[in-house]
Image (cartoon, helix red, strand yellow):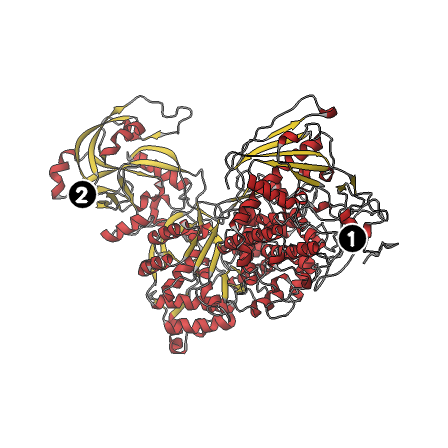
Amino acid sequence: MECTHTHTHTRTGGSEAGGSHRVLSQRNCLNIRGAAYVGLFNFRGGSNVRLSNRLAYCTGVDVQDSPSSKRRSRGPVMAAKKSSGGPEQDGKYKDTVNLPKTTFGMRANSLVREPEIQKLWEDNEVFKRVAERNDGGTFILHDGPPYANGDLHIGHALNKILKDIINRYKLIQNNKVHYIPGWDCHGLPIELKVLQSMDQETRKELTPLKLRAKAAKFAKDTVKTQMASFKRYGVWGSWDKPYLTLDPQYEAAQIEVFGQMALKGYIYRGRKPVHWSPSSRTALAEAELEYPEGHVSKSIYAIFKMVELPPAARGLLGEFLPDLSLAVWTTTPWTIPANAAVAVNEKLLYAVVELLPPMEADVSTPGKKKKRLGTVLQERKKPYLIVASDLVPVLEGKWGVKLLVKKTFVGSDLEGCKYSHPIDEKECPVVIGGDYITTESGTGLVHTAPGHGQEDYITGLKYKLPIISPVGDDGKFTAEAGQFCGLDVLGDGNLAVVNKLDESLSLIMEEPYKHKYPYDWRTKKPTIFRATEQWFASVEGFRQVAMDAIKKVMWIPAQAENRISTMTSSRSDWCISRQRTWGVPIPVFYHKVLKEPLMNQETICHIKSIISEKGSDAWWYMSVEQLLPEKYRDKASEYDKGFDTMDVWFDSGSSWAAVLQKRDGLSLPADLYLEGSDQHRGWFQSSLLTSVATTGMAPYSGVVTHGFVLDEKGLKMSKSMGNVVDPCTVIEGGKNQGEAPAYGADVLRLWVSSVDYTGDVMIGPLILRQMSDIYRKLRGTLRYLLGNLYDWKTENIVLYDDLPMIDQHALFQLENVVKNITESYEKYQFFKIFQVRNILMLLGTSNVFLSPRGSTSFTRRSCQTVLAAHLLSIVKIIAPIVPHLAEDAWQNLPFQVATEDGSIAKFVFESRWPALNERWLAFPDDEVHFWAKILELRTEVNKVLELARSEKLIGSSLEAKVYIHSSDANFAARLLQMCEADNDVDSLHRIFITSQAEIIPSLEDIPSEKVPYTGDYVIEGDNKVWVGVSRADGSKCERCWNYSTKVGSFPEHPTVCARCYGVVNIQPIPALAAVS
């Protein structure tokens, strides 16, 4: 319902007279059918009534002040160790009032309580028992294995808690949930950790087997540490049977996947350029690279002298010989020794240009890039150059010269021309390259070294160019590079090549070039492209099947599909071999003389059986004869075993085979994979490729990705900036508890549920304090509900049709909220649960008053019927997000909850998700509309009550009487009915939390001195509603604190109102209160 209203507050009359003020506000009313509304009785600020021991009914959700008795009943398994007590009561009627009683404390005491609850779950095997008992279908969330190489960070917490929220939701939804946590235990990160812990002397004595043993121990120790942290987050899973990529059974399954791909022809050995890390001395996959900002390369413009023209080009270019050269640009001068060709784009327009004398320019002007002009520009006789025609103006500016165009032609005219290599003077061809040759930068001609670039390699295959790569494992030039031998290609070797080019008059200009450049993600040092003998997976062989499989997967967010599709469609063959010790060996033997590999079904199966029993260490300590099957043992002396290990992405990418296809109860595909967005080029893709290559299908039905965690300013976390948020510190607290308090796991989990994880998310001290406040309010809500249900029995339930209208409306709103929250869980949009504050509104939407007429009174039973529905719904729907809080509340339930089979749900996750109640949702539309107006009316009444409070007319709102006039006759008539309601719950003054409410037919009869504080607003067009507030009539009731003209009318109880007299007159007043 949309409405715009004008509201006026006025004060007049009495000693307060002397002026009036008007407050004009304009806002939209809230849609009561939606989720985003304010609770009808969410009393705050001036309109809040404290839940006093004297108060005969409960009035709001600001429950920090609500009292409770001393220890009372306990939950089905355990109760909180402390109960919160209220202030001392006085007055002879205190024992006739039903006060909240609960053992559920307001303080969470998370440092103690959460571990107690976790031990309770573990001792009773709750996750295992419930998962096995559930019969609503299987749900498999397959865990992406983190590296077992250090402490956990906040990104790990985000990831694992998201998974746990989903698993717990599915569990309470009656699914057989399977979640087997995993760890990636091989690879360079762990190997480096081990090596860094040793001194130089110890390293010298290190054999491969000793290194592997130390790496395995380090990985297993790290797994134990990380597992303890994950458990402390409240994450449930098969912790007693995790999967580790170093387990023999896992390694054997990985060998099996490799073998299947090899036998299908997808695995091959070849010499081709790969990303090579000189700092790690191993090949790297794309997923092992990072591209930090700020890298500066030494870029050069060089010229290669043309020496021979094919017949077709002689008439075109012959006149410019012998002074004609090709101009190229490169950011890797160190690759010039490996140059084998110059490539052009056959469709681009090229030009022969004449170099005119240099223009006057200061090439080292402050603020500009430092340039070095080549000696050739100082020569009297300057060469003619071939460049892309479109780049002539750009190059003039770059080089500081005038370029005169002498002739133009297309790139295809240059094919077959030959030039002299600028270093070793061998003749090399001009070739036609691909679309990678553009005029966006450079000269339009590309220096081509097939041993040092992917496009260069492809072009080289087409023209059968030599694959030259005179660089060793350490990143230094080999003897093949001649005069540069021993120089570091990324250091002094680079400079030496530039100097050599300048000496041979082949350098036009050198300048720094800032761009993104691949770095080794482990050592944080630059990599190079280098041709080596490696093992590859031929993605081309199954690329289309992979693309088709991607389309069948549910991707969250939806744009993730485009991302992985682009990466898969454009990726080159996957280099799967690594030159490291700690990993799963590539099961291949090489002929000592012919160097040909021996790898077939028999050898692979035999090695798989050995590794399954002994682990991959067997490859290092067993002889070739032992590793070969019986058929080949007589030829064992002719073979050596290879020592390349598999890329760790092949390790983790085989987890679907080692876990989903091998563990009982699991199957392919998994329902869900959930990892960070960087895994589109990592685990998501490696899993997809291995699965598609061997099974023809994706290993997952759905994929959810989350962003990275930043500080609350949106900055990347780093120790140097001091903005790192440690999940352990969030839970346990820091050294200074004032600056870093212990929030507990549930507050951390609440933060996870609050963020839109599909993008980058933020966390910091301020955000955590906000989460803590929300947690306290949520806990207070549960305490309020538990306290007012201490004597609840299911036989006291009031049938829906007999409930007061306000309670029916409360159930309608409850069901709408539960429905919205369920949809959010189903779509994995947990932030929407938090965003609309659904949970915190649930209590506020139910204006349920506790009657002082005894535990069997209708109003009390009606109220408790609705409270019980709210309590059970809230506890269940928050359980996946804040399970410790939910379980704590469940253990303090004052009644038992039966499951569908009649057994008692001793734990919250033994219960079921709230079933949708269509009857509650069928609340009539006209009643929904009416209660929306009541909600708005109450908001306006509160404003006037606050004005009266601020002017000292009243303290508590119970000291007030409210007057209402509406120009809408139908609305006024309905309000009048509420004033005369048969049941106390629907009474209008109870909704306002005042002692009296009166509907005024005409404003003319109300003197301003009687009603000193007023306000009005317009609702639904031009319908005006006037609100007035005065002191309540009569005297204050000693028992309920309401004001009534009937106080003093009953000789036996002269200090109580008629309502309370009806209670105390049939109850004996005990001489001493009995406390249970």
Q: Could you tell me which secondary element the residue under label 1 belongs to?
A: helix
Cα–Cα gap, marks 1 and 2 = 104 Å
Return the residue at label 1.
Answer: 1063
Of mark 1 and mark 2, the one earlier in the sequence is 2
Q: Secondary structure at mark 2?
A: helix
Count all numbered tags in the image, as a single digit: 2
Location of residue 389 (image quadrant)? top left
Relative image position of residue 300 (x, y in whole percent): 33, 36
Can you see residue 106? yes
Give the amino acid at mark 1: Val
Q: Nearer the viewer, residue 262 or 51?
A: 51
Q: Report which residue position mark 2 lands on.
A: 412
Where is residue 618? Give x, y as percent: 49, 69
Image depth: mark 1 or mark 2 in front? 1
Residue at 63% x, 47% y: name it.
844
Position in image of residue 1045 (x %, y %): 77, 41
Q: Amino acid at mark 2?
A: Ser
874 versus 21 height, above or below:
below
- On the rendered image, what quadrant is the C terminus found in? bottom right
Q: Is residue 323 left or right of residue 628?
A: left
The residue closer to the viewer here, 612 or 26, is 26
Judge the density around disc 1: few (<14), some (14-19), many (≥20) Cα neighbours within 10 Å.
some
Residues packed near mark 2 inside 10 Å, few (<14), some (14 to 19) or many (20 plus): some
Q: Is residue 940 above or below residue 35?
A: above
